[in-house]
Image (cartoon, helix red, strand yellow):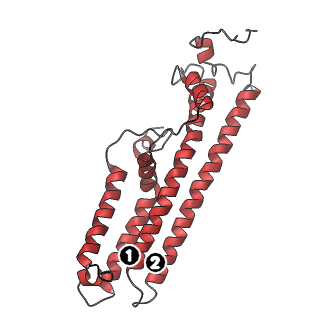
Amino acid sequence: MTDPPTEDADPTDPDLRDVGKGLLDEDMGPSSSMAHLYRGEIHRMKYWRERLDTTTNWAVIVMAAILTWAFSSPDNPHYIILVGAATLTVFLVIEARRYRGYDIWRSRVRTLQENVWSVGLDPRMDTANPDWRERLAEDYRDPTIKITTEEAIAHRLRRVYMPLFAVLLLAWLVRITAFSPDPPLETAAIGLIPGAVVVGVVVVYFAAGLVVAYRPRTWHARGELREEQLRQNR
């Protein structure tokens, strides 16, 4: 039996780097500490995933309530839909903050999956990152947020909120065109604010959302499923 590494062991030793090799052989099993570590990280990731889903559920419920009231009577003001868009933005920011926390735990899970479990299942594979032990240890010593707020917002816009904003925009356009005989620019006015200004602000706001969501960037979130990855042959 190989002696356990000492405090003076070289962290670049392949035997230490490739701890996943042989992990699932018939005469071995996952070490208790590694199995409990992985299970704990999965639990944390699941908890933060549920927090994301809770925020999304509330955003959909509020949006549905606002749209129902906005179209329940021609006398109801159209700008309540814009209030709904502002409320949806608040939910988006909250969810982006939770997504950044979620990414901390998911990045750890992906590190263990790539460098321990995948190598254990197929010992012919090499670790995805030779320095994964040092990086994971540093992350445990000093946990840090790994993605920016803008990237988190872009993720949630692409996955959930851009379709919701599109529904609100379409509903608002219908509300100012189909429910009044006046020209849309006059109907779009809010109090003393001219309709042209309101329309301009709405256009700029939604254009900014599209830029944030779809501008070219280097993604840093670990394990994020994207369209090109889903198309890989299996």
- Count neighbours of disc 2 (C-alpha within 10 A) and say few if under 14, some if 14 to 19, many if 20 or more: some
Number of disc labels: 2
> Where, by quadrant of the figure, is residue 3 drawn?
top right
> In this picture, is 179 found above or below 124?
below
Q: Of helix, strand and loop, which one carries label 1?
A: helix
Residue type highlighted by circle 1: Ala
Circle 2/circle 1 CB separation < 8 Å: yes
Give the residue drawn at x 47%, y 59%.
92
- Residue 10: x and y, percent? 60, 10
- Residue 71: x and y, percent? 43, 84
Give the residue drawn at x 74%, y 28%.
33
Q: N-terminal of the two: label 2 or label 1?
A: 2
The residue under label 2 is 67
Q: Quadrant of the N terminus?
A: top right
- Residue 7: x and y, percent? 68, 12
- Count neighbours of disc 1 (C-alpha within 10 A) and say few if under 14, some if 14 to 19, many if 20 or more: some
Q: Residue furthest front?
A: 192
The residue under label 1 is 171
Give the residue drawn at x 60%, y 50%.
49
Left-right relation of 229 to 103: left
CA separation in Å, label 2 and label 1: 8 Å
> In this picture, is 57 found above or below 119?
below
> In this picture, is 234 found above or below 8?
below
Residue type highlighted by circle 2: Leu
- What number is the disc on residue 6? none
Q: Of helix, strand and loop, which one carries label 2?
A: helix
- Residue 129: x and y, percent? 51, 23
Give the residue drawn at x 24%, y 80%.
185
